[in-house]
Image (cartoon, rainbow, N blue to C red):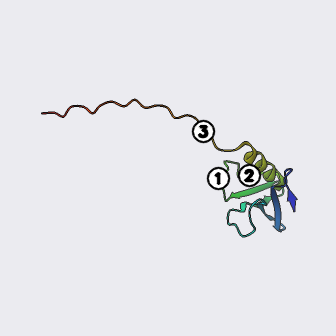
Amino acid sequence: MSTSRDGRFALQQLTSIEWIVVDTALDANDPHRTLACVYEADQFEYDVLWLRDLALPTKYMCPTDVLDDISRAMRRGSRVPSRKPIPIPHRAPAAAFA
């Protein structure tokens, strides 16, 4: 089992050609714990089935590249910081047509 540099994500080999990437920060019974399934397509190509939308590629050169990309994606964050809302001018309703 390989882990990311920060130790949060782990690459677990299931078979000789299949791995899963899990988030170790989540409970073992949490359905969101598994982030991706990685399959060997050929000797130098691995396909990834994403179980979370991380906007990452579906093909890699090796399974550890998947782990590195997930670590980078989760570090940069996906939320835009909160900002003060833009004020909307309010006007009286238009006069009814007679």
The residue under the point 29% across, 31% down is 92
Nearer the camera: disc 2 or disc 3: 3
Amino acid type at circle 1 is Asp
Dot 1 alpha-carbon crowd within 10 angstroms: few under 14, some 14 to 19, many 20 or more: few
Q: Position of residue 9 (x, y in %)?
A: 80, 56
Asked if the residue at tag 3 contacts the one at tag 2, i.e. Cβ–Cβ closer than 8 Å, the answer is no
> Considering the image in quadrants, where does the C terminus appear?
top left
- Locate residue 6 relative to residue 30 in the image: left or right: right
Instruction: Name the residue tied to disc 3.
Output: 82
Distance between the alpha carbons at the discs numbered 2 and 1: 15 Å
Q: Is residue 16 above or below residue 87?
A: below
Distance between the alpha carbons at the discs numbered 2 and 3: 34 Å
Dot 3 alpha-carbon crowd within 10 angstroms: few under 14, some 14 to 19, many 20 or more: few
Question: On residue 32, which mark appears?
Answer: none
Query: Judging from the image, what secondary structure is the residue with disc 1 in?
Result: loop
Instruction: Name the residue tied to disc 1.
Output: 53
Earlier sequence position, callout 2 versus callout 3: 2
Q: Residue furthest left?
A: 98
Q: Nearer the viewer, residue 39 or 53?
A: 53
Q: Position of residue 83 (x, y in %)?
A: 58, 35
Distance between the alpha carbons at the discs numbered 1 and 3: 22 Å
Question: On residue 59, which mark appears?
Answer: 2
The residue under the point 79% across, 60% down is 24
Amino acid type at circle 3 is Ser
The image quadrant of residue 33 is bottom right
Query: Judging from the image, what secondary structure is the residue with disc 3 in?
Result: loop
Earlier sequence position, callout 2 versus callout 1: 1
